[in-house]
Structure formats: structure tokens, C-alpha cells
Amino acid sequence: MTRQKKELLKKINEIETWIKVDEAFGCGFTPPDAYDSLYEEIYELKEQLAKLMHYDSVEAMYLDGRGTVRYTGSDDPEDHIPFE
């Protein structure tokens, strides 16, 4: 993974962590739209990440099924069928 991708993931994680901490310490008293600008920033960072990973959009990045497997109910890894 390139350094730029790692930096984007680190920044996204920092913002999401800050939101979780603020919600925990705020005891539910924050206004409903208090984090809108932060969520917009997260989405912009995810768009940059998707472009670096050669996807057209964030949605395409999340809906990419490569590297996932379908569970067939068996505990034997040989019975797991990869998505196509």
C-alpha cells in the first residue's frame, strides 16, 4: 500500500475516532447536524482513496466483491466458494 493511501486511512480513522469519543463524552446532547462537516470530509478522503485504488467512486470501491468468499455452511475452507 502506498504511503498516500496509508495517510488517507489514518486521517479517516482519526476523524471517525474523534466523532465516537465526542459522542461518548457528549452523552447524546450533540445536535443532529453537529458532525455533518466531518462526515463530508471523511467522504472526500474516501473519494481520494478510491481514485488511488483505481475505482470510479467510493460506492464502486465498497461494492467490489473481489477477495471475498461466500460461506456455504461448512467449516472446511475447501467448501468456501469465492464470489465472482
Image (tube, helix red, strand yellow):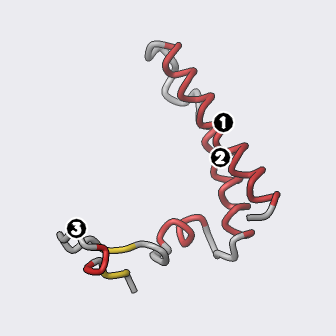
Residue 15, numbered label: 1
Q: Residues within 10 Å of mark 2 (few under 14, many from 20)?
A: many
Q: Residues within 10 Å of mark 1 (few under 14, many from 20)?
A: some
Residue 47, numbered label: none
Mark in front: 1 vs 3: 3
Q: Earlier in the sequence, mark 1 or mark 2?
A: 1
Residue 75, numbered label: 3
Badges 3 and 2: C-beta atoms under 8 Å apart? no
Residue 37 visible? The answer is: no
In screen coordinates, is 12 left or right of 71?
right
In screen coordinates, is 12 left or right of 30?
right
Where does label 2 land, which residue?
A: 42
- Quadrant position of the N terminus in the picture: bottom right
Secondary structure found at label 3: loop
Residue type at mark 1 is Ile
Is 66 in front, or is 50? Answer: 66
Q: Earlier in the sequence, mark 1 or mark 3?
A: 1
Secondary structure found at label 2: helix
Vertical arrangement, residue 34 with respect to residue 52, above or below: above
- Quadrant position of the C terminus in the picture: bottom left
Can you give x and y, in whole percent of width and height, for residue 55 in the image?
Answer: 64, 75
Is 57 in front, or is 78? Answer: 78
Badges 1 and 2: C-beta atoms under 8 Å apart? yes
Can you give x and y, in whole percent of width and height, for residue 4 in the image?
Answer: 81, 58
